[in-house]
């Protein structure tokens, strides 16, 4: 690592030029090819997947996106002559727009003449028309769909409200993606300036992270052409990349600045920073990549693309941290220190860093009251985790969009006028190969009409190959658990009775059933995935710290952080505590893939802080064999950097709430909460308190296991050229009598 840093500092202009050329090349290629992101959750082997395959085979003409135009009147009914004329003209104009293949309305003019199709509500004040595009939403442009929206909404008056809903219409909903990125970077810049006191040093972590993330986003766009990549993957990659990228660079720049204050040259300080903190960054980044790629265990192409995209982003942030960052450090030279620090260095010469102030006082305070503080921390984590017990996995729809959006309004108008189940009907697909099968299907249709929880059933529509389909409208909304129970009841009880003794084969599909199946598959595989991730993390920590206690505590801490962060996510998004005020829409279920991705990312982030904290404690333990001293010194010397890194990451994650995307906002709030709890409650409070209570047992490892384990060194001491090993170069904190509860602890005398 030191050789790599030396080469990058000496060839800094070449390194910077290579990164810029890579970014420009990938950008040009991405602009030329465009993107091919996916917003479908294909789950192989599920009943909804089988139904979708049969529908595509029997009705190939229904491949395009099907959206709705909804209109509502206040005083007159939708059958009034003026309303009918105005909406008929609007539907006729929409039907002639590019990309629109069919418009099916209730009036029998510019649309298919079927006024009895139930497209007018019973009270006569709400009606809707169905728009069929020539392609699915993934292959339609937002500008193309926007013309449909503008044309339809132009028919509205003070007494005639026109709204639109559907997957394609969702393309026109504006998000604040760029704003969230700008806000996140701006807040990170402020924190970095306060931490470093130098504009040049503040700029480096941001430049490194932005270059890496920008390159990754372009690479992800190209990747979408060769594998299934979710449409939220670029935003998620940006969220993760900016957070970890700035943090990783912060650790390296902090070590570099420490070297400069000790009298090292710019090149020596950069070499030492990469050889020490850079090794920890590679270790932490590698664990994030391995954990994220663990999503391949689930065998879902949808998540495979997310895993590759996220790991690519983290990989590039690590690469930028150990190559581009040393080059930039070489460019700014001694300006990595503030003017005051440079003046002090010139006047007084090199001096070791001695932790003083709040960090030292807090470390002594934790040492004095480990039982009380451990109890408080555990209580906080437990209270925040309680909402997780009511976690309901499901997929949000346009009913969860922000209030006032056309998609949310259209959803609500349809639900109020026609019933909540109309927004998420079930598609029942039947294979009938003989007369007996057709008779059985007729009996099943009649049975479905009298099944509790079913509001309406259409007449079977015949298709190619003996396949027929019918639509079942539930009495409850698509996100309701009652709808999930209805799907289970139809598949497990109603349909098997109709199939018995006949050739009839029936499958329940549709968007609502597909989302339900997706959540079920994820939930079934989640315990295995979490177990693999925790086992991997425990093994790495066991190799690094030669202890059974360290990895066991880390596993418990990771589970606690995930559970508590999910508690906050459930309270905001599922219970609706403040979601509308934050512009995040109505309360609804938690996305089924959120636990998988959050567990992966949090595992890596927790490893980052765990390694940074415990490695310093471990060094002191090896030097003194005094557990109390090791924990006190390690916490005092690392807590400030951990807290600064956490504030940056929290700011970046929370800024993505401004994106307006519900899924990204879930990730942002969930990850920000987890990082806050991990840094301020677990790593700087609960972990050191428990380590004080356990004493020497923290570092116990059976002799037979010690002899058989390979050695993994994350940050070896004595790597600074021209200096003593770090455990001697940084004076240990003197014994400080910690105060009583309520007393302000005194800082140790650095002399």
Image (cartoon, rainbow, N blue to C red):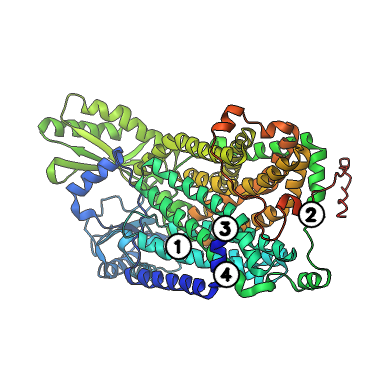
Provide residue 624's location: percent of width, then percent of height.
76, 40
Left or right, 310 with reference to 353: left
* Alpha carbons under labels 4 and 1: distance apart: 24 Å
Image point (54%, 68%), residue name: 8
Q: Which residue is mark 1?
A: 216
Residue with the most extreme front position: 722
Q: Is residue 624 visible?
A: yes
- Dot 4 falls on a residue whose secondary structure is helix
Between marks 2 and 4 in the image, the one whose residue lies nearer the viewer: 4
Left or right, 423 with reference to 500: right
Q: Nearer the viewer, residue 295 or 326?
A: 326
Q: Is disc 1 surrounded by few (<14), some (14 to 19) or many (20+) residues within 10 Å? A: many
Left or right, 620 with reference to 115: right
Between marks 3 and 4 in the image, the one whose residue lies nearer the viewer: 4
Q: Which residue is mark 3?
A: 243
Q: Which residue is mark 2?
A: 355
Q: Is residue 459 visible?
A: no
* Alpha carbons under labels 1 and 2: distance apart: 38 Å
Q: Are marks 4 and 1 in contact (CB under 8 Å)?
A: no
């Amino acid at each position: 690592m030191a050789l790599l840093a030396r080469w990058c500092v000496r060839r800094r202009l070449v390194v910077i030029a290579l990164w810029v050329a890579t970014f420009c090349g990938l950008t040009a290629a991405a602009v030329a090819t465009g993107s091919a992101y996916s917003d479908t959750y294909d789950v192989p082997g599920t009943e909804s997947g089988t139904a979708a395959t049969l529908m595509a085979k029997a009705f190939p003409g229904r491949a395009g996106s099907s959206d709705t135009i909804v209109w509502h009147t206040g005083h007159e009914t939708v059958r009034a002559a003026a309303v009918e004329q105005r909406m008929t003209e609007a539907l006729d104009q929409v039907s002639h727009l590019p990309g629109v293949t069919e418009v099916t309305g209730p009036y029998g003019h510019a649309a298919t003449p079927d006024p009895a199709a139930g497209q007018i509500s019973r009270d006569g004040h709400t009606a809707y028309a169905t728009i069929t595009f020539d392609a699915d939403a993934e292959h339609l442009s937002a500008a193309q769909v926007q013309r449909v929206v503008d044309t339809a909404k132009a028919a509205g008056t003070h007494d005639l409200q026109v709204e639109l809903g559907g997957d394609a219409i969702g393309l026109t909903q504006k998000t604040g993606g760029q704003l969230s990125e700008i806000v996140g970077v701006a807040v990170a810049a402020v924190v970095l300036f306060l931490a470093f006191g130098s504009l040049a040093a503040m700029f480096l972590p941001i430049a490194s992270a932005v270059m890496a993330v920008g390159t990754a986003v372009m690479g992800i766009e190209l990747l979408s052409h060769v594998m299934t990549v979710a449409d939220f993957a670029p935003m998620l990659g940006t969220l993760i990349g900016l957070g970890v990228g700035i943090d990783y660079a912060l650790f390296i720049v902090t070590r570099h600045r420490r070297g400069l204050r000790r009298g090292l040259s710019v090149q020596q300080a950069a070499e030492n920073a990469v050889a020490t903190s850079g090794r920890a960054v590679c270790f932490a980044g590698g664990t994030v990549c391995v954990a994220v790629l663990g999503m391949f265990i689930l065998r879902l192409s949808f998540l495979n693309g997310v895993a590759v995209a996220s790991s690519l982003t983290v990989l590039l942030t690590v690469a930028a941290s150990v190559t581009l960052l040393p080059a930039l450090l070489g460019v700014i030279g001694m300006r990595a220190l503030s003017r005051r620090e440079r003046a002090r260095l010139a006047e007084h010469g090199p001096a070791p860093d001695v932790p003083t102030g709040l960090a030292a006082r807090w470390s002594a305070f934790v040492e004095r009251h480990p039982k009380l503080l451990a109890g408080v921390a555990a209580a906080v984590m437990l209270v925040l985790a309680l909402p997780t017990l009511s976690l309901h996995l499901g997929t949000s729809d346009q009913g969860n969009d922000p209030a006032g959006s056309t998609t949310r309004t259209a959803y609500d108008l349809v639900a109020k006028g026609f019933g909540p189940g109309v927004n998420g009907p079930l598609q029942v697909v039947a294979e009938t190969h003989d007369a007996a099968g057709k008779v059985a299907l007729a009996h099943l249709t009649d049975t479905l009409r009298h099944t509790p929880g079913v509001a309406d059933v259409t007449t079977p529509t015949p298709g190619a190959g003996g396949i027929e389909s019918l639509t079942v409208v539930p009495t409850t909304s698509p996100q309701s658990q009652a709808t999930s129970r209805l799907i289970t009841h139809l598949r497990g009880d109603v349909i098997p009775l109709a199939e018995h003794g006949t050739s009839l084969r029936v499958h329940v599909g549709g968007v609502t059933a597909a989302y339900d199946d997706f959540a079920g598959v994820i939930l079934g595989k989640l315990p295995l995935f979490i177990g693999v991730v925790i086992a991997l993390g425990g093994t790495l920590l066991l190799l690094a710290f030669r202890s059974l206690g360290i990895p066991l505590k880390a596993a418990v801490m990771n589970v606690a952080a995930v559970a508590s962060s999910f508690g906050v996510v459930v309270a905001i998004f599922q219970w609706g505590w403040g979601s509308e005020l934050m512009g995040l829409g109505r309360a609804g279920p938690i996305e089924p893939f959120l636990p998988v991705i959050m567990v992966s990312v949090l595992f890596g982030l927790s490893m980052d802080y765990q390694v940074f904290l415990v490695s310093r404690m471990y060094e002191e333990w090896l030097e003194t064999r005094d557990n109390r001293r090791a924990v006190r010194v390690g916490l005092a010397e690392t807590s400030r950097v951990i807290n600064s890194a956490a504030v940056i990451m929290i700011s970046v994650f929370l800024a993505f709430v401004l994106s307006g995307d519900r899924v990204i906002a879930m990730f942002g709030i969930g990850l920000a909460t987890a990082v806050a709890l991990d840094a301020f409650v677990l790593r700087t409070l609960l972990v050191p308190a428990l380590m004080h209570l356990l004493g020497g047992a923290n570092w116990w490892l059976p002799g037979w296991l010690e002899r058989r384990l390979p050695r993994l060194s994350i940050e070896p001491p004595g790597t600074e050229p021209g200096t003593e090993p770090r455990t001697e170069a940084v004076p240990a904190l003197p014994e400080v009598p910690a105060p009583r509860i309520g007393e302000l602890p005194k800082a140790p005398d650095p002399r």
